[in-house]
Image (cartoon, helix red, strand yellow):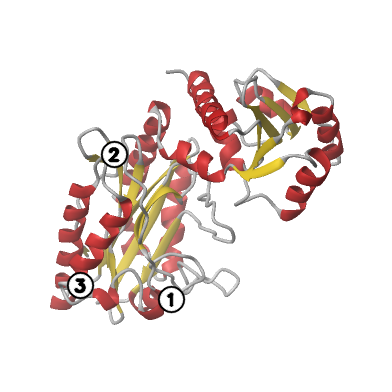
Amino acid sequence: MSHKTALLNRITTLQTIMREKGIDVTLLRQNADLFYFTGTVQDGHLVVPAYDTPRFWVWRSYERALKDSPLAELDYIKSLRGLSQFKELVHSSTLGDAKVVGLEMDVLPASLYLFYTQKVWPHAKVVDISPMVRTIRSIKDAHEICQIRQAAHKVNVVLEKVPYFLKRSRTELDLAALIEAELRRQGHCGLMRMRIWNQEMGMDQVVSGSSAAIPSWTNTPVGGVGPHPAFGMGASFKEIKENEIVSVDIGGWHNGYCCDITRPFFLGQPPKEVLEAFEVVKALMAKLESLLKPGTIAGEIYQFAIDFVDSTGMSSHFMGVGNNRVSFIGHGLGIELDEFPFISKGNDMLLEPGMVIALEPKIILRNYGVIGLEDTYIIDNDGCQRLTMGKQELVVI
């Protein structure tokens, strides 16, 4: 399947759902959604009618959009003041007659929402198209799976070098810098996209020892001190010491698509407490892998993990510390790091073939650090395949 065919199929799927829901026009503005449906990230308006050809009105950069996107209907908006031009373009076509309009209401800024609803479609009913778009995006096509496989291959190249990097590092930031430099050499764009508002993530999360128990504003099981309160998570100036766990959580990336992997490293001889915690995590991961199959309810996988860890007596250390524990055990990913489905408390979404999911069971030991695994999987017709590579082991250095 060509990339153009994949894009057109995605648009056709969206239009089918729009017709089922009675939505006349959908407007997409968010970068990840634009990339998914157009093949480029440019500042523009993708307008998808339920029964006609989509139009992509681009401000910056129109020239790059022409080069990157295989879509036929591209038009130029002259400047940021082109919002008024966009309104005129809509009103001069049948698009302005839409009775029901879909907007990405989970990510659209309030000022733009008010402009579209008061100036462009003042008489239309407005609905949130985001859940429908995110559901479509949760099922990866062959092109997307290929990109994620490549991301997994690249991140494995980097992960294999971590023991060498670790021996050269003095601080968490030293180690993170070496990892990130290698990721960049592999073609990483330098960031990981997230959809949830005010959630930010770099290429990796490197924490050692007690810093793993330091919470952050991000909805993640592990926080970290970070380099400054301005970005208080992940690697810090803390020195990496003997007899503590170094957790390396890497976000791989290839052609716009990501994967996620975590491995624990231990400097010295791991004590019994650390080894026992790792055995719990490894056994749980094996159980969770067996549940990743079509028809399984996402929330039931989460509850299984909670019950399993409760039976080991380690529940107070699982997926965070104290009041900072998160209510998920895994997440979908693709263009963004936080895609559907979430393997989370009470989530009744069914797993389907083509979904890509990262499982990340983690136990935080205040005296030693975070002992956790994370791997990326694709759901197939029979169960799941692990895309990220390497042994699921505690690496002793």
> Can you identify the residue that label 2 sits on?
379
Number of other residues with Cα within 10 Å of mark 3, as a class: few under 14, some 14 to 19, many 20 or more: few
Q: Residue at x 47, y 36 (%)?
A: 136
Give the percent coordinates (x, y) of residue 175. Answer: 40, 62
> Can you identify the residue that label 3 sits on?
310
Number of other residues with Cα within 10 Å of mark 1, as a class: few under 14, some 14 to 19, many 20 or more: some
- The N terminus, quarter of image: top left
The reply to whether the C-beta atoms of the residues labelled 1 and 3 are less than 8 Å apart is no
Horizontal side of residue 279 vs 130, given as left or right:
left
Q: Residue at x 48, y 23 (%)?
A: 6
Give the percent coordinates (x, y) of residue 308. Answer: 18, 66
What is the CA distance from the residue labelled 1 to the residue labelled 3? 32 Å
Give the percent coordinates (x, y) of residue 312. Answer: 15, 73
What is the CA distance from the residue labelled 2 to the residue labelled 3? 27 Å
Closer to the chain start, of discs 1 and 2, is: 1
Number of other residues with Cα within 10 Å of mark 2, as a class: few under 14, some 14 to 19, many 20 or more: many
Vertical comparison of 87 with 8: above or below: below
Q: Residue at x 24, y 46 (%)?
A: 292
Closer to the chain start, of discs 1 and 3, is: 1
Query: Residue 39, can we see it?
Result: no
- Amino acid on which the number 2 mark rests in the picture: Ile
> Can you identify the residue that label 1 sits on?
238
Closer to the chain start, of discs 2 and 3, is: 3
Query: Residue 344, can we see it?
Result: yes
Element on which disc 2 rests = strand
Specify the label residue 18 is tagged with: none
Element on which disc 3 rests = helix
- Amino acid on which the number 1 mark rests in the picture: Lys
- The C terminus, quarter of image: bottom left
